[in-house]
Image (cartoon, helix red, strand yellow):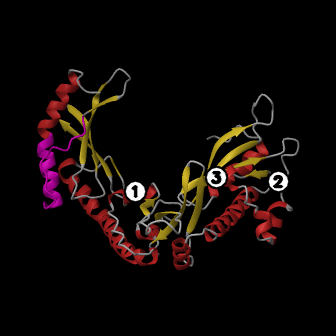
Amino acid sequence: MTTSAFLALIAFQVNYNLNFFVFTPSMNVEQMWSSDKYNAPPFDRFTLLIPYCLDYIKWDVIYNPDSPNAAPDVIFGPEDDDFHPFHMYPSAQLNHCLSDWSYKDPTRLLTLIQFLRDQYVLYQRKRVGEVDDDRLKFEVSTIISREGIEMHMSSGAEKLEEVKFAVPLLDININKMVPCCPWRYPQKIHLQVVYPVGRKYMSPPSAPRLKLVSSSELKALYSTDDFKLPPWLDGMCLAEYLPNLEEYLGKQVLEAVSLIEVRRHFIEALACPFGRPVEADPVFCRKATFLSASGVFTFLVHFKIPIQFPKQQPTIMLQSSQHFNSQMAPMKSRLISDYPWSPRWEPLQMAERICEFLADEALNFKRQCSEGQVQ
């Protein structure tokens, strides 16, 4: 959401807050409104979506329209009535956040939000620690020292109480493993663990709900959707489950990094029959485009290469350089994957077999373009 509708002094701080927040996914502004009875711009209050425990918490930030250079008020969610950050751990940082506020310093809002989020982490840990559940108390005691772990206690009138953990996995810097890495912030993989809050008279505890979660940017290299979690055995605790999970996951991430070079060799092999690519993904080698011709008919060949290459074959799409639809957009073919393929072939053989297949496919595509059968 654009911040141009804010008061200038507020927009200055909000933009800095959104651009330099160090967690992933990034912080966002959900909605903006004004103290003016007509709710007309410029706006002086907004709702922040702040990433926490693999979800978002919503806080309203309210500036005083008569004194926008003063520190704003922050209103927490209705489920956090007991969250009083300024009474938890008084510190010099708090005094720096508020008493020394300066609208000319764009870092102040970010400093305040990060301080409040840090306090919220401690608040949720305290809530979870007070739950009357022996299993949860034991689980917390075995993993609380793990760096970066977050937890959240949720309850409501229409749902059972549950505790959610966000456990960071793999003590490795994935960014440094990727040459010419484009990622701004460190990429992380987390295990989401959800425990129902039990009662002493209930049956023996069941396995928690488990899910592997990563940032959307990491999917260019590795998809957690394809990862099959190890089984949770009866009587197992999280501290026992994590080592085997991390060992297996670490091997898969290393393999994913090595497959970048495999895809790069394939794109280089395509250059033999097709010529140098017009465009190619230089980092992850997931895409490449070549200019080709069949007689006087010229067209682009787009390759989309999956992260599981060569186990999974690329998809191909043709795009005419001479035919356009009613919206003046170039005509494109269907996604093509029914061409000869074997993951055991050498890259050059793969490229040559694709080129042979496209010799006939290009003629069909030209005819379809001329007859207006494609979009």
x and y percentages locating residue 214 in the rendered image = 45, 60
Single out the mark in the foreground, 3 or 2: 2
Kind of residue at badge 3: Leu
Q: Which mark is residue 251?
A: none
On screen, residue 289 above or below 115: above
Q: Which mark is residue 219?
A: 1
**Mark 1 near mark 2, Cβ–Cβ under 8 Å?**
no
Q: Which callout, 3 or 1, points at the residue further toward the start of the chain? A: 3
Residue at disc 2, secondary structure: loop
Q: Where the N terminus falls, by quadrant?
A: top right
Q: Which mark is residue 18?
A: 3
Regarding residue 283, the answer to whether it shows in the image is no
x and y percentages locating residue 133 in the rendered image = 56, 70
- 284, 44: nearer the viewer: 44
Q: Is residue 339 left or right of residue 16?
A: left
- 290, 115: nearer the viewer: 115
Residue at disc 3, secondary structure: helix
Q: Is residue 31 left or right of residue 43?
A: left
Range of magenta residues: 334-358
**Distance between the Cα atoms at labels 3 and 1?**
22 Å
